[in-house]
Amino acid sequence: MSDRPFVSRTWALKGKTPVISSTGSWKNLSISGMIVCTPGGNRTRLFLRIFPGSMHAKDIVRFLKEVKRVLNGKKLLLLWDGLPAHRAKIVRDYGVYENTRLRIERFPAYAPELNPIEYLWSAMKRKDLAHHPPAGIGALRRRIRRSRYRLSNTRLLKRFLKASTLY
């Protein structure tokens, strides 16, 4: 997420070009997210972590360790897209090291409709983060936290799972 405004639609009077204000900054935040549930799609939980700048493989491993700690050693089947940080050697090595409690499977390439977290990203971008005037990274971080609170609703998370046709 960037502190440049995400604008899905805008309007202006006929003959007037719309002007969208921006800070002109290239600062950004990366978000890693995971919807955790039982094999039947129940007891859903949302884990989100905000990283300054771009996300790297070490950040992914740190996020996985945090999730594993919270889950108290329960087994985890992780369904992932093809993000380069997900395929990095350090992440693969961590998956091999944790193979008794962590199993990693990849989504098919170019199939975001199968990934439940993509529905969450869409809701976050189009509803919670869209059309806000630029106010810097701190304000963006606060909006993301408010969005996380709203999207942590169990019924909403179950709808994301159902929309993906995995459950």
Image (cartoon, rainbow, N blue to C red):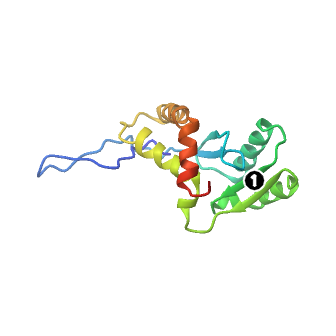
Residue 144 in the image: above or below residue 11? above
Q: Is residue 158 above or below residue 165?
A: above
The image quadrant where one finds the C terminus is bottom right
Query: Quick one: label 1, few (<14), some, or many (20+) residues within 10 Å?
Result: some
Relative image position of residue 155 (x, y in whole percent): 55, 38
Q: Is residue 2 left or right of residue 35?
A: left
Query: What's the residue type where badge 1 is placed?
Result: Leu
- Residue 2 is situated, as x and y percent measured from the top left of the image, at 48, 45
> Is 61 on the left or on the right of 110, as rendered?
right
Judging depth in this view, the residue of 62 and 155 nearest the camera is 155
Name the image quarter holding residue 153.
top right
Q: How many marks?
A: 1
Seen at 44% across and 44% down, the residue is 25
At horizontal 52% and vertical 34% (from top left) the residue drawn is 141
Quadrant in the picture for residue 69:
top right
- The residue positioned 45% from the left and 41% from the top of the image is 3
Residue sitting farthest toward the bottom: 109
Image position, residue 41 (x, y; %): 66, 47
User: Is 75 placed left or right of 34 in the picture?
Assistant: right
- Secondary element at image label 1: strand
- The image position of residue 20, as x and y in percent, is 29, 44
26 versus 85 height, above or below: above
Task: Identify the residue under disc 1.
Answer: 77
Residue found farthest to the front: 40
